[in-house]
Image: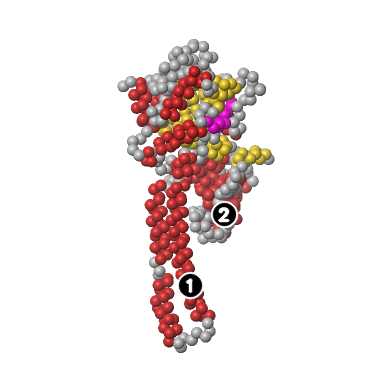
Amino acid sequence: MGPAARLAALLAVLAFRAGDPAEVAARGDTFSALTSVARALAPERRLLGLLRRYLRGEEARLRDLTRFYHKVLSLHEDSATPVSNPLLAFTLIKRLQSDWKNVVHSLEASENIRALKDGYERVEQDLPAFEDLEGAARALMRLQDVYMLNVKGLARGVFQRVTGSAVTDLYSPRRLFSLTGDDCFQVGKVAYDMGDYYHAIPWLEEAVSLFRGSYGEWKTEDEASLEDALDHLAFAYFQAGNVLCALNLSREFLLYSPDNKRVARNVLKYEKLLAESPNQAVAETVMQRPNVPHLQTRDTYEGLCQTLGSQPTHYRIPSLYCSYETSSSPYLLLQPVRKEVIHLEPYVVLYHDFVSDAEAQTIRGLAEPWLQRSVVASGEKQLPVEYRISKSAWLKDTVDPVLVTLDHRIAALTGLDVQPPYAEYLQVVNYGIGGHYEPHFDHATSPSSPLYRMNSGNRVATFMIYLSSVEAGGATAFIYGNFSVPVVKNAALFWWNLHRSGEGDGDTLHAACPVLVGDKWVANKWIHEYGQEFRRPCSSRPED
């Protein structure tokens, strides 16, 4: 098997499935790509149609019941209606023996609700799974952490970063969309079920506050209640070491549900604990945010994301410049590309307007039916992980002439051979709710990496194209370079992953910051070492 065949076989294993493209996206992965979330609007529109038909049926049924009610009521209100009239006496007996039975035992209501349930069951297979609800809730917590968002503000539909007394608006939506008490409860419960009380408490506190404000109102769609929120929040505070808060919340719970023996026992338990350790009543509880992936560069990474794009300004560093790039290529002489040198070590360049709107739309359209949950290398396996939330697809250049043109343009700019097996097929990525990719290298750092199965060496360079714009977030952060590049629609980022010696460049550690608002699409072209020997000659000097 030749190198090209090996590359094709490997990428087929990593990226393609046989069968209908519609079957590619698995249930439970809806949250991991915004295009999948958008597709969920279609089944909800079908559900709205079912509900509209149900409401019309119920309205007709209630109109008929109202007619019957007023008909009988009018007979009772008319004092001149004697039962001595045999016709009226007959209708009274008939109503009590027959009419009321038909009204009470009418099947019309059950037929209406049965039709609604049957319709829901037909749509159910197209709906997001519970794993999607969990993933979407974790995404809100991620955005809360990375951008230091205020939970109370989020619940009101406001994206604000609160640091001490300073409040910064990160995004101002055209229309405010607030969360309900049940919405906040569900987010808090996801954290609660993971034992993550750092995140559970503020979301459950907001749920309690909203439920208190609407207590007594009944909403069909709500799963939780004030009692549920108080119960979970009390135990979360207890687990976090704040026994006094747990006690007060449990006492409040008993005001609404005095017969709950479990919570009554908890009250006695908390009172005993406070009696034995009075200091707990005044002790400040400091909760530490969990660092689940044990990310050592988390503070730097999040700081760069919070800048929402912070590449150095050229007037401060004269060696950073802008120019029209031809790379001495005849292909670019008539249409040079606008080049912006973003950073020198690592060397990172931004090519503006590298693709047109039409080209970007074509690439997104070609990839969309084949999108699958993005994976990362774990030893010799490829696994989906929480620190990379997106879907991706691989496109051969034979799929569409636009991809051939794209390869020619990349080759002309970089001077590198971008044809397989010396480069990978184009990977197209769509990020999900709060979609991100925490700090990572594009090049392989382990000899067991699947990249080496292609027998074309390591990834020497990355060419990443922004196929869309976003309203906020989503910047590319270079951790050790200490700069970030915002999403620039139709532009392309280029950097070298390896030194000329073949050693990995540690300064290329980078991350895709969580998308705060927007639909982020990128396309990656990874170019390998082999085939570039005379295009980028080797050097023994470490600094090259």
Q: How many labels does the image show?
A: 2
- Residue 205 painted magenta: no
Rate crowding at label 1 as few (under 14), some (14 to 19) or many (20 or more) other CA atoms within 10 Å: few
Q: Can residue 263 be seen at all in this image of the molecule?
A: no
Q: Look at the magenta stretch and give its main secondary structure.
A: loop
Quarter of the view holding residue 166: top right
Look at the picture and state if 272 lies above or below 218. Answer: above
Q: Which residue is drawn at 40% across and 55% down?
A: 119
Which element type, helix, strand or loop, lies under badge 2?
helix
Q: Which residue is drawn at 45% across and 87% down?
A: 85
The first of marks 1 and 2 along the sequence is 1
* Depth check, front residue: 7 or 211: 7
Q: Among all residues in the image, which is located at the extreme right?
A: 165
Q: Which residue is drawn at 46% across and 21% down?
A: 411
| Residue 59 at x, y percent in the picture | 47, 64
Look at the picture and state if 232 lies above or below 496. Answer: below
What's the amino acid at mark 2?
Answer: Phe
Which element type, helix, strand or loop, lies under badge 1?
helix
* Depth check, front residue: 361 or 306: 361
Q: Among all residues in the image, which is located at the extreme front?
A: 334
Rate crowding at label 2 as few (under 14), some (14 to 19) or many (20 or more) other CA atoms within 10 Å: many
* Depth check, front residue: 269 or 343: 343
**Residue labelled with disc 2:** 211
| Residue 180 at x, y percent in the picture | 55, 51
**Residue labelled with disc 1:** 67
What stretch of residues is rendered in magenta?
Answer: 476-490
What's the amino acid at mark 1?
Answer: Arg
Q: Among all residues in the image, which is located at the extreme left?
A: 1
| Residue 219 at x, y percent in the picture | 52, 57
Contact check, label 1 and label 2, Cβ < 8 Å? no
Q: Viewer-nearest of labels 1 and 2? A: 1
